[in-house]
Image (tube, rainbow, N blue to C red):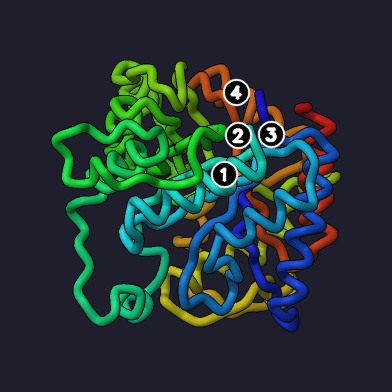
Amino acid sequence: MKLSVLDQTPTSNGQTSQQTLQNSVELAQLVDKLGYNRIWYSEHHGSENLASASPEILIAHIASVTKQIRVGSGGIMLMHYSPLKMAELFKTLSTLYPNRIDFGVGRAPGGDWHSTLALHEGKKPRMDNQYEKLKETIMFITETMPEDHPYHNTLAAPFGGTLPEVWLLGSSGSSAAQAGQFGIGYSFAQFISGQLSAPMLDAYRSNFVPSEIMPNPQVNVGYFVMAAETTEEAEYHAASLDLNLLFMEKGMPFKVLSPEEALNYSYTEMDKMRIQHNRSRFLVGSAKEVANTLRHHDEQFGINEAVLGTISHSHEARLKSYELLAKELL
């Protein structure tokens, strides 16, 4: 099984955005040396605790300070942008860093309504044309716009370079078949829904049409993960993410609090139920326990790759989690 990273650039309480992004550089360089396959950056707007509003800029910088790891978006929120601009951005990145760039696309707003409205200059955004926009972006990237298309004479520069990999991100399974029909990769966000299933991935594989971008189907699954030397230590650090998810669901502003703050928080009975429910979205335990669960999922669902997102108050604990899992699985 391949291991990869989803870096949502979490900002801990008391930490500056500059420190957060420097931590992201340190993480990328570590996992590059450890042999992780790719690292993706998410797009979140109007967030106090996530510093990645412009993944395309992070991709360019991280690719320049790493050597072999693939770098990409996990994902760009295509609803906010034109297909031509996205094709130009990722063709440029892929020309600068051949065979290392991923264009991962999400269909959510990636922020609250105020941010979405501002991104669309006060106009109500369309939500019903995202597959059409993705199809046009792919045609711009591959330089295969049909003659009868209005954009046939519009070219996305630069030309003739290495193509980026294209991935469609999903959390409900509804996009699995569509990803297959486009001939691109499918990334299922277990960390959002907690509902990974074999029929969902089968729908992707059975509908897959080989393409210039991807000749064979590729699946990866994204998890929230906290691994440590012991189960007890992992549970201690995971308390921060438990509280983060709770605050997120309540729409409360927050940064990543320390495990001590999280463990001393006054939870209602409903809060405790939500925390228990959210545990289906991530893996917590010793590195051996987490690795065994990932191996089981690989056997059960045939996933090619696990994309691990670790959010903790301690940057050192975060790095250690990735290091321990590399020792177990790579």
Q: What label does residue 186 carry, if any?
A: none
In this view, the residue in front, 287 or 172, is 172
Q: Is residue 192 visible?
A: yes
How many angstroms separate mark 3 from mark 4 (CA)?
20 Å
Pointer 1 local density, CA inside 10 Å: few below 14, some 14–19, many at least 20:
many
The C terminus - image quarter: top right
What amino acid is labelled 3 in the image?
Asn
How many angstroms separate mark 4 from mark 1 (CA)?
14 Å
In this view, the residue in front, 159 or 45, is 159
Q: Residue at x 66, y 23 (%)?
A: 1
Q: Is residue 164 above or below residue 270?
A: above
How many angstroms separate mark 1 from mark 3 (CA)?
15 Å
Picture quarter containing residue 262? bottom right
Task: Locate residue 35, reporting x and y percent.
Answer: 79, 33
Where is mark 1, residue-wise?
A: 223
In this view, the residue in front, 303 or 65, is 65
Where is mark 4, residue-wise?
A: 296
Q: What label does residue 306 carry, if any?
A: 2
Task: Locate residue 251, reporting x and y percent.
Answer: 42, 77
Element carrying mark 2: strand
Determine whether label 2 and label 1 are within 8 Å by CB: yes
